Image: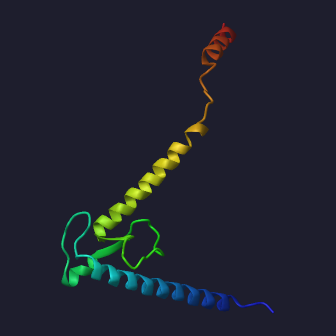
Amino acid sequence: MAKSPGTDQSRLDRVVAEARRHSTEREATYRERALKLYPHVCGRCGREFSGVRLRELTVHHKDHNHDNNPLDGSNWELLCIYCHENEHARVADEVARDRSHGTEESVATHNPFADLQKMLAKNKKSED
């Protein structure tokens, strides 16, 4: 018996909702622990956060593994949303740069103008 498309979609919706809930719960746990362990100061720019603005302070995983959450907080640092975004952009730039350096060996070696002098001479002879 074939499943209806609606059944697959509702199952997918449930799986996505559960994954989001799990991610939010996990984040809330390590965020709360990090906020208890560290002063409410951005580790990069040094801005202090309190009250409503505390939500602008995020937990950055130093090894970029969100599942690595040791109880001592050794894989975390508190960063403001701006510095956190900058950190991830910097890492993405480094990865892109490393990828581009790895392709230097596969650079095209064909020179379309290598025989240009011969072709011009040949054309000149044919015109005469």
The foreground one among 117 and 57 is 57
Left or right of residue 30: residue 9 = right
x then y, percent, for residue 79:
29, 69
* Residue 114: image location, x then y, percent: 61, 21
Q: Residue at x 67, y 8 (%)?
A: 125
Residue sitting nearer the eye, 85 or 74: 74
Foreground of the two, 67 or 53: 67
Q: Is residue 2 above or below residue 55?
A: below
In this view, which residue lies farthest toward the front? 72
72 sits left or right of 42 in the view: right
The N terminus: image quadrant: bottom right
Left-right relation of 85 to 117: left
106 versus 85 height, above or below: above
- Residue appearing at x 46%, y 74% in the figure: 68
Q: Residue at x 60, y 86 (%)?
A: 12
- The spot of residue 59 in percent (x, y) is 34, 74
Q: Position of residue 62 (x, y in %)?
A: 39, 66
